[in-house]
Amino acid sequence: MKEVKTDWEAFYNMLTGPDLWVDIALKIGTILFILFMAMLVIRIGKKIIQNLFKKRRRGPFQITERRENTLIKLLENTLTYTIYFAAIVMILQNLGFEVGAMLAGAGIAGLAIGFGAQSLVQDIISGFFIIFEDQFSVGDYIQTNTSEGFVEEIGFRTTKIKHWTGKIYIIPNGNIKEVTNYSIHNSIAVVDVSIAYEGDINRAEEAIEELLQEMPNRYEEIRAVPELLGVQHLGTSDIQLRIIAETEPMMHWHIARMMRKDIKNHLDERGIEIPFPRLVLYSRTDEAQSIEGGEDNG
């Protein structure tokens, strides 16, 4: 009984003694200090990366803004992963774990997992070639076989694409088999304008051509004077004229909307009618009455 009591007394003394709580406080303080320093190093490192690219813009070797944003994001992610990994190792050492043995075991386990996780290796390799070949960059508007939107982030394993509705697609790089990039070259805005059959086509074309000459001065996104191609379609109640305009990448939707508005107002000022659907009503009752009235008169 004395031995049991002695053990309980030793355990109680350990819990109530100052040494245990001082040791716990020191370990917690060390962990918090490690996390604080990790976040501080990450923040400073990101600032250094951004400043390096700012200085590079003034140098002789220039890279596109698209590629610059991609490389900045990739370097920031690499820095974050590296610093947090080092912080976790230091925290484990502080808690008394044998980090060397754990890393050796993790290396062997990682090698074994690597042989089985072929899709993970494929994702990493595909991500490397996406960046190396500059297939697309952060900020580009792309379309893949499964999604469409603006590229938010290109990581080692996944790519994040933001749809215009706000949805975020997270796609493994190995699943990106085909990409359509809309942000590399200038876009083409296509506008169809309808003219009534009763209208004067030549007069309408002259009015539109007059307006098109002013378009580059109105909108800086237009790269050249828009071109009136001519009659595109003969509809049931209208004649369609097609206009194309070369714009900055991804600005064709905005320019097309503004051109439709300006053309409509310009044609109204010239008294040129935009057609509207016409409906002819035919009444069999009225026809029958007219036929009967004709027979009676006969």
Image (spheres, helix red, strand yellow):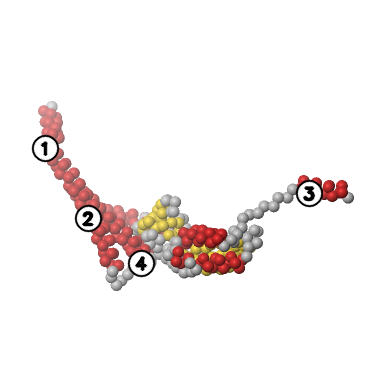
**Residue 183 placement: quadrant:** bottom left
Question: Which numbered marker is on residue 41?
Answer: 2
Find disc 1 in the rendering and name its residue.
18
First of labels 3, 2 by sequence position: 2
Foreground residue among 58 and 298 = 298
Q: Is residue 248 visible?
A: no
What x and y, as percent, mark residue 212?
Answer: 51, 67
Q: Residue furthest right?
A: 298
Q: Which amino acid does the dot numbered 2 rest on? A: Val
Mark whose residue sits in front, 4 or 3:
3
Q: Which amino acid does the dot numbered 3 rest on? A: Glu
What x and y, as percent, mark residue 122?
Answer: 38, 59
Question: Which numbered marker is on residue 287?
Answer: 3
Circle 2 SS class: helix
Q: Which amino acid does the dot numbered 1 rest on? A: Pro
Find disc 4 in the rendering and name its residue.
64
What x and y, as percent, mark residue 227?
Answer: 52, 68
* Residue at 17%, 45% in the rendered image: 29
Given contact means CB atoms under 8 Å apart, are the residues at marks 4 and 3 in contact? no
In the displayed structure, 175 sits above or below 59; it is: above
Between the residue at mark 3 and the residue at mark 2, the CA separation in whole angstroms equals: 90 Å
Mark whose residue sits in front, 4 or 1:
4
First of labels 4, 1 by sequence position: 1
Between the residue at mark 4 and the residue at mark 1, the CA separation in whole angstroms equals: 61 Å
Given contact means CB atoms under 8 Å apart, are the residues at marks 4 and 1 in contact? no
Circle 1 SS class: helix
Quadrant in which the N terminus appears:
top left
Q: Residues within 10 Å of mark 2 (few under 14, many from 20)?
A: some
* Residue at 24%, 60% in the rendered image: 48
